[in-house]
Amino acid sequence: MPSAQPDIWTPFTLGGGTIQLKHRVVMAPLTRNLSPVTSLTSRPCSMCQYYSERATDGGLLISEATPVSIEASGMPGVPGTFTDEQLEGWKPITAAVRAKGGVFFAQLWHQGRNTSSALTGGRIVSSSTVPITDAQFGWRGLDPRPFEAPHALTVEEAQATQQDFVRAAERALEAGFDGVELHAANGYLFDQFQHSNINQRTDIYGGSIKNRNRFTLETVDQVVAAVGADRVGIRLAPFGMFNQARGEDRQAQWTMLCEALAGKGLAYVHLIEPRFDELQSEAEKLANLDANNPLTALDLSLRPYREALGSTPVIAAGNYNAANMNDGIGAEHDLVAFGRYFCSNEDLVERLRSGLPLWHYNRTRFYGPFPDNEIGYTVHPERKTHKPGERIQFEGESLSF
């Protein structure tokens, strides 16, 4: 008899076969800006509580983005993976997740040009000297200012940056993480090599699609060599436009990238859904995605990338809720990542399993720091629930739950 169609509660094995999951709900990486850049030790207890409350037996959690160096940092309040002090700060947090039976991957991050020397104290780097021009750099405690023109990494400097990812991956496993996810989405450093409007290079890392993918693929290979393919995932956004990522020939670019990743035996590839966008409507996004090769609504699908990845497990993220969480499982993806609902529902997995209403998230508390950091993080004094499929108006936006 044919096997039953899998759903979100069907157990799953990550790539390599060494990590067994008991369900397919994934906690997406959620930057909260509630930790010191260079230290975790001043807030270990609240972070232990935050992550351990969201951990479940056999469930995968991906940490908030962690810079691999001070040069990689792009905002205050994000915990790193590049010093001994940070490693020690993470150990009780990973232990707390492990005690619940959770599987914990650290997301490794380099902001590239999306930062300021006022924050890092050093130069800003990218694939080329192209700055962000449609926004300003600013954060609580830092006055808004134009983004600086970055230094274009030399080949040798780019390869040294790859070693920052290797060292961070090794530190993450030493700190107790089960694996690492390379953040190659949202206009950060990997995207700055991948997108043709940012990457103006003429050397081995620029020009053709193959060359623009080279920095990402070389980094994957080096991290895999250091910690093992079954301990490495990567996050991609083939349709992403964040941080002025406006490259052309997207389908060809990310199909070729996924084909190259398919043979590496990775734990997973994490894809952001095409219709998910914080800034633009679907119509606006379609109009702006690829001037060279205009896309239609039918092109907004992860299926081509799933096919290119072959048997590599795929996590899908973006606008999932209790009503649609099983859509596409086994066809377009294998696992589903929830982000915003994990902010407001520490028991999200149980609520989804039991059909309980979900607590709505408070967008104003997503990103700190605040004088009262625990509010909206580990303490939720004024929560409201919404039933699956219910629509409400929030900040001028119609939202479905």
Image: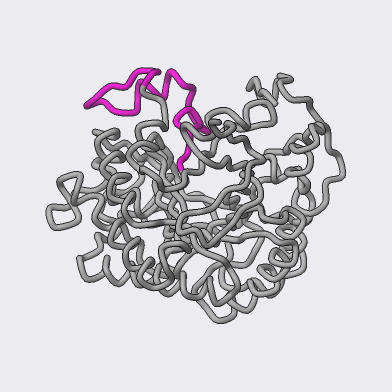
Q: Position of residue 147 (x, y in %)?
A: 39, 51
Q: Position of residue 275 (x, y in %)?
A: 48, 27
Q: Quadrant of residue 394?
A: top right
Q: Which residues are magenta?
A: 271-298
Q: Is residue 284 magenta?
A: yes
At horizontal 24% and vertical 42% (from top left) the residue drawn is 196
At horizontal 74% and vertical 65% (from top left) the residue drawn is 48
Q: Is residue 79 left or right of residue 384?
A: left
At horizontal 71% and vertical 21% (from top left) the residue drawn is 389
Q: Is residue 255 left or right of residue 301?
A: left
**Colour pattern:** one colour
Q: In front: 89, or 117?
A: 89
Q: Position of residue 16 (x, y in %)?
A: 45, 59
> Residue at the left extreme?
202
Q: Position of residue 34 (x, y in %)?
A: 66, 59
At horizontal 15% and vertical 45% (from top left) the residue drawn is 208
Q: Is residue 307 magenta?
A: no
Vertical order, 276 against 183 (above or below): above
Q: In front: 96, or 263?
A: 263
Vertical order, 267 against 293 (above or below): below
Position of the C terminus by quadrant: top right
Q: Quadrant of residue 204?
A: bottom left
> Residue at the right extreme?
381
